[in-house]
Image (cartoon, grey):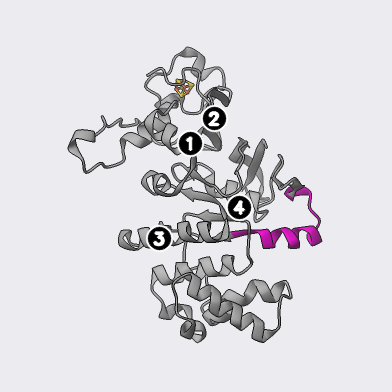
Amino acid sequence: NNLKKYFPIKGGILRHTVGTVKAVDGVSFTVRRGETLGLVGESGCGKTTTGRTILRLEQATSGEVLFEDKDVLKASSRQMKALRRDMQIVFQDPYASLDPRITVGQSVAEGLVIHGIGTPKEREERVREVLAKVGLHASQINRFPHEFSGGQRQRIGIARALIMEPKLIVCDEPVSALDVSIQSQVLNLLRNLQREFGLTYLFIAHNLSVVEHISDRVGVMYLGKLVELASREDLFREPLHPYTKALISAIPNPDPTARRERIVLQGDVPSPINPPAGCRFHPRCWIARPICSEQDPEFAEKRKGHWAACHFAGEF
Ligand code: SF4
């Protein structure tokens, strides 16, 4: 609820604060149990920071994060330890997220060790089970990360999260570092695991096709704000925000009869240090009118279950 994460920018010899990056600036949404909520946007839009702040890997500047009515941001370190079992993350880079000095078995078991779960023998048994669930062979338990391909390493990353029997997994661009041919295998694995274990995903990605493939609902972020949120069907069939429409128009479609008119946005994403006044998208919006540079549009439910932050939502 109204989540904010600002980073101070230090400068000068004394390293004093010379500005603020508003990476996440008042974002509110709900992730329903058992669903996949896709969070999409260009790099620098704040989607990864949102995910990390929800898990308290970054300290929020303000706002509220409720997990089954427990206030995550106010949880004591003991309460947080319990919450961490329920809320796991799969990182973007399967090459950087695994410690090269420890075996895959040790890496996957790490959460169990930290939380003091099971005897060493029980942990090893559990690691073997989880490795099998993610499509790896139990005999690979004593190998090191460098012996695996990118796709296999991401499976190990998923196993690390899965072994804690979490309820929510924040998937932070889990396939963007992988070859396209491997991406769909990992996405299908995530979907199968979701079905089998009743998992809930917050799925962060910059690639709209990937989000379309896996999400039940989709949120679109632009420059630290959530600008649209809807079911996958509504969002892709009838986007209400011009930015979403432009993103969708850029998805390649192999079917020539179904090709959409490509909307090419002018200019780059402005700096989050001094974002434009009013609607942050107005310098790039082809339907902007004077009110857009003066008044920040409210993020409001324009149709049932379909939210957008635009003064002229759907009027294009
Ligand atoms: Fe464009 Fe105005 Fe809507 Fe912003 S509020 S997206 S500038 S029409």
**107 inside magenta stretch:** no
Report which residue position mark 4 lands on.
Answer: 52
Whether pointer 4 and pointer 1 mark residues with C-beta atoms closer than 8 Å, the reply is: no
Mark 2 secondary-structure assignment: loop
Report which residue position mark 1 lands on.
Answer: 231
Q: CA distance from mark 1 to mark 2?
A: 7 Å
Report which residue position mark 2 lands on.
Answer: 305
Which of 118/247 is in front?
118
Give coordinates of residue 143: x percent, y percent.
48, 84
Give coordinates of residue 88: x percent, y percent.
61, 60
Position of the N terminus, as image quadrant, is: top right
Residue 95 makes an appearance in the image: no
Marks 2 and 4, the one that precedes in the sequence: 4
Mark 4 secondary-structure assignment: helix
Q: CA distance from mark 4 to mark 1?
A: 23 Å
The amino acid at mark 2 is Gly
Marks 3 and 2, the one that precedes in the sequence: 3
Compared across the picture, whether 266 is left or right of 161 comes to: left
